[in-house]
């Protein structure tokens, strides 16, 4: 099949969407599909500092097209970028017709891809991820209507788990039977445990991902001063709250017990996990956490939260430890347990690794998505209203947070 995959953030951007995209692209190529990826990116240095920026790199077997998000960088003019995405998809279709369009993220890429699909008479698949469920559509009437139309009219809606589907249903009213559950997955050949036992010394705690208070990074730092036992912690990644996190670590007197390691190239991430013992993700909500799956595959014990997108893969005291989001004292207690009890660390890590290898295979997920494409191949996009009212939105001043 000829597949056009439309991404909002791809490498070098730091995002779970980048990881999802690269693994899916590899599966499609391995399955014999002819794949084009159209991906937005940040060129403005200030905005690139939040997520990473620059044109997307080459992907073997994939025709890659980068579109700088000029409108988003210009006071959050998402509509300008939507027009650019539609035009780019249409140009590529005229060059070599597509069979199916697949958008990653409901808005703006999903909305743009649905418009292009209707114009070209093609089926459209949309993966609902991250902010789609948590806040897009609660920000303004423009984005609410766009999200509702995507949710009501896309040929297929892919979502990572039941808890995330429930959140979207509760917030935007989407019928649960509209969703196809496609769980997160991890490349278990790339993400593997350390070959040797952990060295003697402090228990090594790792936070890796977007450095964003919505991911719980500030809660993690707040919890650390009262964690008993011998430990060291690493904060890996970039994001909107790097400077606040560094300032908080200084205010808390954490000193050389916490290291901020900055940007981590995807190919180097497995070694980063393997250099630690416990993965800490006190997030408030996820679509489906790629980093948790990666940590599980690398043999780390996981401490996270009873949060949307987490509870689909982590069960408290079975394959990880869960606390309530924002409950810093409970997080402190959980971290103390895994730091001071090596037997528990080993038990949780072993259970997580076994489940990851058994359940979260990209081979299975790739086959499921390719099957969805084939089922939709001859079902072109149905009619919907493309006109949206322009209403004030808080994300226009901070569009990178959308």
Image (tube, rainbow, N blue to C red):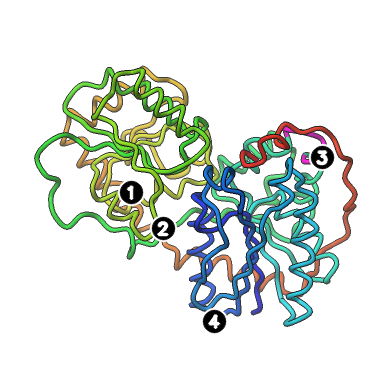
Is label 1 in contact with label 2 (beta carbons under 8 Å)?
Answer: yes
Quarter of the picture holding the C terminus = top right
Task: Estimate the spatial distance between the alpha carbons at disc 1 and disc 4, rounded to whole Å.
Answer: 30 Å
Hey, which quadrant is residue 359 in on the image?
Answer: bottom left
Measure the C-alpha gap from mark 1 to mark 3: 39 Å
Coordinates of residue 89 in the picture (x, y in percent): 74, 69
Which comes before the other along the chain, label 2 or label 4?
A: 4
Left or right: 133 in relation to 53: right
What percent of the width, then of the height, locates residue 254?
A: 28, 23
Residue 86, picture quadrant: bottom right
Which residue does the image show at 33% across and 18% down from the upper left? 252
Q: Is residue 69 above or below residue 199?
A: below
Residue 142's disc number = 3
- Residue where numbered disc 4 is placed: 32
Which stretch did the figure color magenta? 138-143
State the mark number for residue 296: 1
| Mark seen at residue 186 | 2
Q: Nearer the viewer, mark 3 or mark 2?
A: 3
Q: Nearer the viewer, residue 297 or 212?
A: 212
Numbered disc in front, either 4 or 3 = 3
Residue depicted at x 32% and y 53%: 297
Does the residue at mark 2 contact the one at mark 4 (Cβ under 8 Å)? no
Instruction: Classify mark 1: helix, strand or loop.
Output: helix
**Label 4 residue SS:** loop
Closer-to-camera residue (241/202)? 241
Mark toward the start of the polypeptide (4 vs 3) = 4
91 w.r.t. 341: above or below: below
Number of residues whose C-alpha sits closer than 10 Å to that of mark 4, classed few (under 14), some (14–19) or many (20 or more): few
Q: Earlier in the sequence, mark 3 or mark 2?
A: 3
């Amino acid at each position: 099949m000829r597949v056009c995959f439309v991404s909002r953030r791809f490498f070098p951007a730091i995002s779970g969407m980048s990881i999802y995209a690269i693994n899916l692209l590899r599966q499609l190529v391995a399955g014999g599909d002819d794949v084009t990826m159209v991906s937005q990116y940040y060129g403005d240095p200030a905005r690139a500092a939040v997520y990473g920026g620059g044109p997307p790199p080459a992907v073997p077997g994939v025709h890659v097209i980068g579109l700088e998000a000029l409108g988003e960088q210009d006071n959050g003019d998402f509509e300008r970028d939507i027009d650019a995405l539609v035009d780019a998809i249409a140009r590529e279709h005229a060059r070599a017709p597509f069979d199916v369009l697949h958008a990653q993220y409901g808005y703006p890429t999903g909305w743009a891809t649905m418009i292009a699909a209707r114009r070209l008479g093609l089926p459209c698949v949309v993966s609902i991820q991250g902010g789609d469920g948590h806040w897009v559509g609660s920000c303004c009437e423009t984005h609410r209507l766009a999200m509702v139309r995507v949710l009501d009219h896309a040929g297929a809606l892919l979502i990572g788990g039941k808890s995330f589907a429930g959140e979207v249903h509760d917030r935007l009213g989407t019928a649960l039977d509209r969703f196809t559950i496609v769980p997160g997955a991890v490349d278990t050949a790339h993400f593997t445990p350390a070959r040797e036992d952990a060295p003697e010394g402090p228990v090594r705690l790792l936070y890796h991902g977007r450095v964003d208070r919505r991911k719980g990074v500030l809660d993690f730092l707040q919890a650390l001063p009262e964690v008993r036992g011998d430990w060291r912690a690493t904060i890996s990644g970039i994001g909107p709250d790097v400077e606040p996190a560094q300032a908080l670590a200084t205010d808390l007197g954490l000193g050389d017990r916490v290291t901020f390691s900055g940007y981590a190239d995807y190919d180097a991430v497995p070694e980063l996990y393997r250099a630690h013992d416990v993965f800490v993700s006190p997030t408030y909500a996820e679509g489906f956490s790629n980093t948790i799956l990666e940590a599980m595959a690398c043999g780390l014990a996981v401490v996270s939260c009873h949060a949307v997108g987490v509870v689909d893969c982590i069960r408290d005291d079975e394959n990880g430890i869960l606390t309530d989001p924002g409950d810093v004292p409970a997080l402190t207690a959980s971290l103390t347990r895994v730091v001071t009890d090596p037997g528990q660390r080993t038990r949780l890590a072993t259970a997580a690794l076994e489940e990851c290898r058994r359940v979260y295979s990209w081979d299975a997920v790739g086959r499921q998505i390719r099957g969805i494409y084939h089922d939709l191949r001859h079902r072109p996009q149905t009619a919907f209203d493309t006109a949206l009212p322009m209403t004030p939105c808080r994300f226009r001043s901070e569009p990178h947070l959308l």
